[in-house]
Amino acid sequence: MISLDVLMWVFLASYVIHIVDDATMNGGFIRWIQASFWPTYTSRMNFWFNGSAVSAIAISNLLYDLFGGHWVILALIWPFGFALHGLTVHLPLLGDPHLALDRVNPPR
């Protein structure tokens, strides 16, 4: 069985892969956000948000690795928060054609 601390670091790796995917998908996440929700959203804002999130996840994982115990709560907030976000935001949007990525950046 895989230990919890390994799973926390795997979660961080999967988040980094998610960031790279967002940056390269269908014209880019930033352009999609600008066209769909937030016209003034910039790549600088995206960089600082994702950089801060990666740092916070890494610090949470380090605190749990070094001190164990109750620090597990801080490390577990991240995967549970992302799962809750996926269930409450992304799943309901699957059927909404107005938010489809190919509507903003149609395939060529």
Image (cartoon, helix red, strand yellow):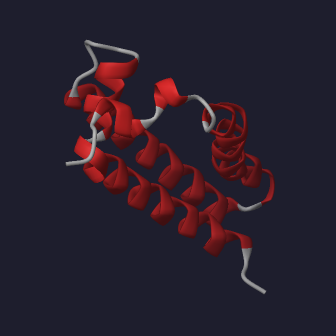
> Would residue 95 be found to the left or right of residue 23 on screen?
right
On the image, the x and y values in percent for residue 72 come to 74, 55
* Left or right of residue 73, residue 55 in this image: left
* Residue 14 vertical position relative to residue 35 in the rendered view, above or below: below
Query: Looking at this rendering, what residue extends furthest in the bottom direction?
Result: 1
Q: Nearer the viewer, residue 8 or 104?
A: 104
Question: Image height check: is 95 above or below 37?
Answer: below
Q: Position of residue 69 (x, y in %)?
A: 80, 58
Residue at 78% x, 87% y is 1
Name the side, left or right, on which 52 lies relative to 40. Answer: right
Would you identify the image quadrant in which residue 30 lies? Answer: top left
Pick the front one: 87 or 47: 87
5 vs 53, left or right, is: right
Residue 41: horizontal and vertical position, in percent?
Answer: 28, 19
Residue displayed at 55% across by 67% down: 9
Residue that protrudes farthest toward the front in the picture = 108
| Residue 27 image position (x, y, % from top left) | 23, 42
